[in-house]
Amino acid sequence: MEKHILIRYGELSLKKSNRSQFIQRINHHIKAALSHFSNLVFQNKGMRYYIILNDHKPEEIIPLLKKIPGIYSFSVVTRCESNLESIKVAALEIMTQELAKEKKTFKVETNRAYKQFPHTSLEISQMVAGFLFKSLPGLKADMHHPDFTLFLDVRDEGTYIYTEVISGLGGFPAHIQGKGLLMVSGGIDSVVAGFLALKKGIEIEAIHFASPPYTSDNALQKVVDLLEQLAPYTLNGTILLHVVPFTTLQQLIFQHVREDYGITIMRRMMYRISECLAKKISAEVIINGESIGQVASQTLESMNVINSVVTMPVIRPLAVMDKEEIINIARNIGTYDISIRPFEDCCTIFVPRHPQIKPRLSAAEKEEKNFDFEKLVEEALKKIETIVLTTKQHYQVVGPIDLF
């Protein structure tokens, strides 16, 4: 008997014409994520994908599989020959292990994909259950609320037996949908938005606005640590972070713009810079962590005025989520504790006492005429520094780079 992991795909049923391309992308991602394990064997059998463990422990592999977009679920399975005696022996071994976990009630479900097998699915379930009752005194059947279900998947090449279905990430294969530029701060929301974009198959690069000395190296390190949590969800385990020097532009905004419009104008500058960069890196969309009504710049009126400076689509995965929903995702992906480190980003400095929550476009455009922002935007773009982030818990600065 051999230990395998059976992979099941997620939203691929919605993409019938592209199914083979999607499956190839997920399978490639699985192999890349597990490349440091020696002697694993991968078998592709239509809509089923098997990893033959060859004595590797499933516990080492399961956490990595949970971070691969496009996997709906998976199971650790025992493979045996497709004959009744082999199935009984394998089932008895598995049931003995389950009883050791103080599980007492069960049911058997059989999928008879091998139609030449000499018994029906119901007969196989009944015969295996009867054998288990005789072999394991105290075992009870419960067809409605069992402690666990013994699944028998009878196929031509062998029978696969398992008791647990482990949820995967779901979504679409990594990078299958094109590229987006993620506007990332050091807060809770933006990195969660990046995670949701990755889950939907969007490749991401990130842009961060730094305002030293008002923002510290610790604030930038927080962003680096956050994005390193997202790197394992990518196809190659790497995310590029583009750091924009924003100090001069931000200072002039708050010197020349009326106080209540400061945040509005600041965000319009960020959008302008983000769109320019997005076009240079061939991104199709801008992504951010805005949630309707959460702060002054995220009212519908503010979003409309701020968004008007770009023509590129802006995706807001968190737009209609409650804060608690966002926090729960952050905790699940391991970013929450990093996000609440007490280091301010540029969005939390120079905050006006009473920011405008219903700005008017004409008023915003009038305020922008008070200083030469176009030259400052161009200078900021030329001084962008790029950091390569990987799953290896380290990063490399490779900029400034010649983007412009």
Image (spheres, grey):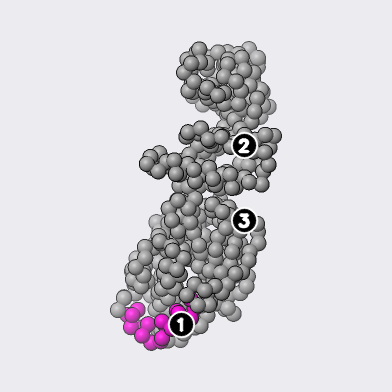
Residue 319: which numbered mark, if any? none
Write down the quadrant of residue 241 in the picture. Answer: bottom right
Classify mark 3: helix, strand or loop: loop
Sequence-wise first label, 2 or 1: 2
Q: Which residues are magenta?
A: 363-381
Q: Residue visible at 58% across and 28% down?
A: 162
Q: Position of residue 107 (x, y in %)?
A: 54, 22
Pointer 3 local density, CA inside 10 Å: few below 14, some 14–19, many at least 20: some
Viewer-side label of 2, 1:
2
- Tell me if residue 9 can be seen: yes
What residue is shown with label 3? Answer: 391
Q: Residue visible at 50% across and 67% down?
A: 207
Sequence-wise first label, 3 or 2: 2
Query: Is there CB contact under 8 Å for labels 2 and 1?
Result: no
What residue is shown with label 2? Answer: 41
**Residue type beneath disc 1:** Leu
Q: Position of residue 62 (x, y in %)?
A: 61, 41
Residue extending farthest to the right is 55
**Residue type beneath disc 3:** Thr
